[in-house]
Image: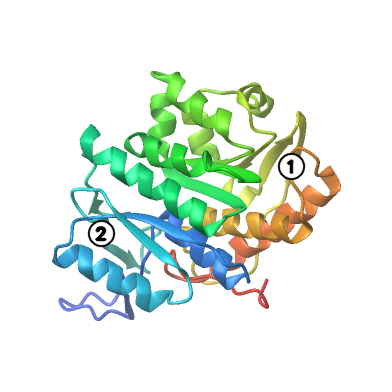
Amino acid sequence: MLGIFSSKNGSEKIPLSLCDVSFSGSSGDVAIALHKLGEQPLLLGLVGPDDCMGSQLLKIARKRSPQIPFTPIRALDETSISFLPIDESLPFLKNPGKRGEVLSEAEIAPRVYKVKRVMREQRCSWAVATGVRIMEIPFAEALLGAPDIAVKVFGPHRTFCERCALEPKPFHRMLGMADIFVLNQDEFTACGWSKLDDVHQFGPKLVVVTQADQGGVYSLRGSVGRFEAFKQACARVYPIGAGDWFLGALVKALVVHGEEPATIKESILRECLRYAAKAAGIKVTIPGSSRGPNLREV
């Protein structure tokens, strides 16, 4: 839920200038971005049990994005719901929310099988596992390990990055399955690396680290470069979801060019990164992580 208001008038009752309920999360944002940019993504989502909250989440998902095929894989003990109160008179927002994280080994196996079955039936050519947490490794591995996947994209959650220094093997195993590795600067720092090209030894051919309004850096098979952020004048910046829209737009651009990280020319990659940066730059002017520009606007 997104609530936008301003407390500068000092009244006891503050009206909301916008109240919106949207289906979000990193995977949802990337899928919505891909759809709005003209692709046909298939979204696999881990959702809560079939209670009131879980049922409402599915209704929101299908109402907000009816054109995106959504396969719910019931897994988490609690549905991921958060309320984002945005006070436009303050510099930033608070993000209280909670997420269930417990699955027994007996519960994991049939859900992993469902991921594999869906990927096989849909004949997907790209796989994007983003916002991956420690307890979601089996599902991400099933996604990236599906047969006939041409390009595999891995984006970890910050908590996974923080565990990397203490328990590197699961992280390195995920990297070994990925062709493209995308994360932000805070996440990269949390991993404990100092250089982008350190990551290539584990598998990815392309590493991209976003740096908010500073643009970002990349390493393509060891060739390191920088890309600029796309900036436009706006009264308010909404950064939540910008990284997801960047990732969705980057995948879109690479798909359109028909390029893969193992063979892409650096000049083409830079063009794709400019496109992704523009999508993210437009997105931060729009409130709500699952809201962003369409194909024509980018």
Disc 1 crowd, CA 10 A, few/some/many (<14, 14-19, 20+): some
Q: Quadrant of residue 180?
A: top right
- Judging depth in this view, the residue of 292 and 14 nearest the camera is 292
Q: Secondary structure at mark 1?
A: strand
Q: Quadrant of residue 112?
A: top left
From the top left corner, tell me how far across and down residue 172 is, in percent: 51, 24
From the top left corner, tell me how far across and down residue 62 is, in percent: 36, 74
Residue 40 can be seen in this image: yes
Residue at 82%, 51% (x, y): give it: 268
Marks 2/1 in contact by CB < 8 Å: the verdict is no
Quadrant location, the C terminus: bottom right
Residue at 66%, 26% (x, y): give it: 200
- Between disc 2 and disc 1, the foreground one is 2
Residue at 66%, 49% (x, y): give it: 215
- Judging depth in this view, the residue of 72 and 164 nearest the camera is 72
Amino acid, disc 2: Ile
Would you say 287 lies left or right of 282 here?
left
From the top left corner, tell me how far across and down residue 50 is, in percent: 17, 61
Quadrant location, the N terminus: bottom left
Up-down relation of residue 45 to residue 172 (above or below): below
**Nearer the N terminus, badge 2 or badge 1?**
2
Q: How much space separates mark 2 and mark 1, taking CA atoms?
A: 36 Å
Residue at 29%, 68% (x, y): give it: 58
Disc 2 crowd, CA 10 A, few/some/many (<14, 14-19, 20+): some
Amino acid, disc 1: Arg
Give the number of the disc on residue 183.
Answer: none
Up-down relation of residue 13 to residue 114 (above or below): below
From the top left corner, tell me how far across and down residue 204 is, in percent: 64, 32
Give the number of the disc on residue 81.
Answer: 2
Give the number of the disc on residue 226.
Answer: 1
